[in-house]
Image (spheres, rainbow, N blue to C red):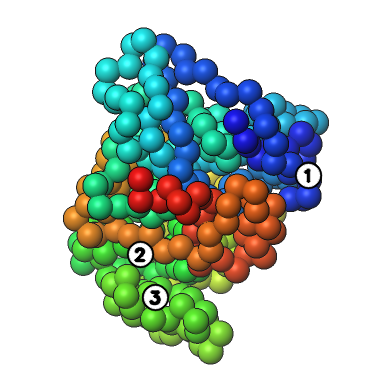
Amino acid sequence: MKAAVYERYGSPDVITVRDVAMPEPKDDELLIRVQATTVSRTDCGMLHGRPAIFVRPGAGLLRPKRKILGMDFAGIVEAGGSRVVSFKPGDRVFGLSPNQFGAHAEYLCVPETGPIARMPDDIDFDQAVVCEGAWYASTYIDAFGLKGGERILIYGASGAIGIAAVQLAKFHGAEVTAVVATRHLALMESLGADRVIDYTHEDFTAIGETYNFVLDAVGKTTFFRCRKLLKPGGTFSATDLGPLWQNIALSGWSSITRGSRVVFPLPKASESAVTFLRDRMAAGEFRSVIDRRYSLDEIVDAYRYVETQQKTGIVVISDPSASHE
């Protein structure tokens, strides 16, 4: 099969697309023919092996142990192991491969009981590779304990996590303020944001309003800059470690003091989370926003684009001829 392989940490230039051995499913695994995947911020971090203190102990100190990246996938069940009972060949499925990655290839093996579900009938493969952003977004929303009527401000709402967070917060009945650049104003309104702030023309920290929760969905601001936006007892969280890893330190201090001023939850993928997302997609309560599409042969260009940190939503790797299969 064809796959995007990286033998060492580095820039996108270390990736080569070449033929490798087909994976063989274990007794409890599914062999998926991958129809769509994404290049994400997580993939770029793994490619560079950063942050090294977190990535490399598990991924490989000097060279990567797993040489094919890609966490999000949508595809067709090709075969199943002897103990597989929930899926059959031909099923259209989507989900995450958070432990072994491997979706930047024509085939992928995943556990039957992992974060995987059947796709809604009316969703194309390239529209279904949204799990990673939703996985992170739901982790923060769950950590907040977000309830109907509460107010949340989402900074950097135009990325994969931010777009997912806006939609999931609205599903929970929250009042959502989205902070984005000018070109994303209409998108945020179409996703249901109650208020949209253009950070290129207005300092979102000086709007004179307060919120139950503030989520930095791109890791480009800080608690100290945003704390005046928080109501008494309000909570801040970010999808990045922050300068000098301050978000971990502040979260630890909040735990010691039995407060909730800053939280830094770790995501956990599950089958139920993907099933929940499938139901939201089927009901028209969650949709993908695709910035660009590339073929597997063009994946190096996809990485280069994602590393500009200017993408809107997701960057998809797919076979265009298979998107409606």
Identified at 34% across, 37% down, the residue is 93
Examine the rendering and report whether any part of residue 25 can be seen. Answer: yes
Q: Quadrant location of residue 116? A: top left
Identified at 46% across, 78% down, the residue is 184
Mark 1 or mark 3: name the one nearer the start of the chain.
1
Labelled pair 1, 2 in contact (Cβ < 8 Å): no
Q: Nearer the viewer, mark 1 or mark 3?
A: 1
Residue under pointer 3: 187
Q: Left or right: where does residue 214 sit relative to residue 99?
A: left
Residue under pointer 1: 14
Residue under pointer 2: 166
283 over 19 or under it: above or below: below
Mark 1 or mark 2: name the one nearer the start of the chain.
1
Most foreground residue, 170 or 127: 127
Q: Nearer the viewer, mark 1 or mark 2?
A: 1
Q: Quadrant location of residue 101? A: top right
- Disc 3 marks a residue whose amino acid type is Leu
Identified at 27% across, 18% down, the residue is 85
Disc 3 from disc 2: Cα separation: 11 Å
**Residue 19, image x, y percentages:** 67, 32
Q: Left or right: where does residue 100 sit relative to residue 273?
A: right
Mark 3 or mark 2: name the one nearer the start of the chain.
2
Disc 1 from disc 3: Cα separation: 35 Å
Q: Secondary structure at mark 2?
A: helix
- Dot 3 alpha-carbon crowd within 10 angstroms: few under 14, some 14 to 19, many 20 or more: some
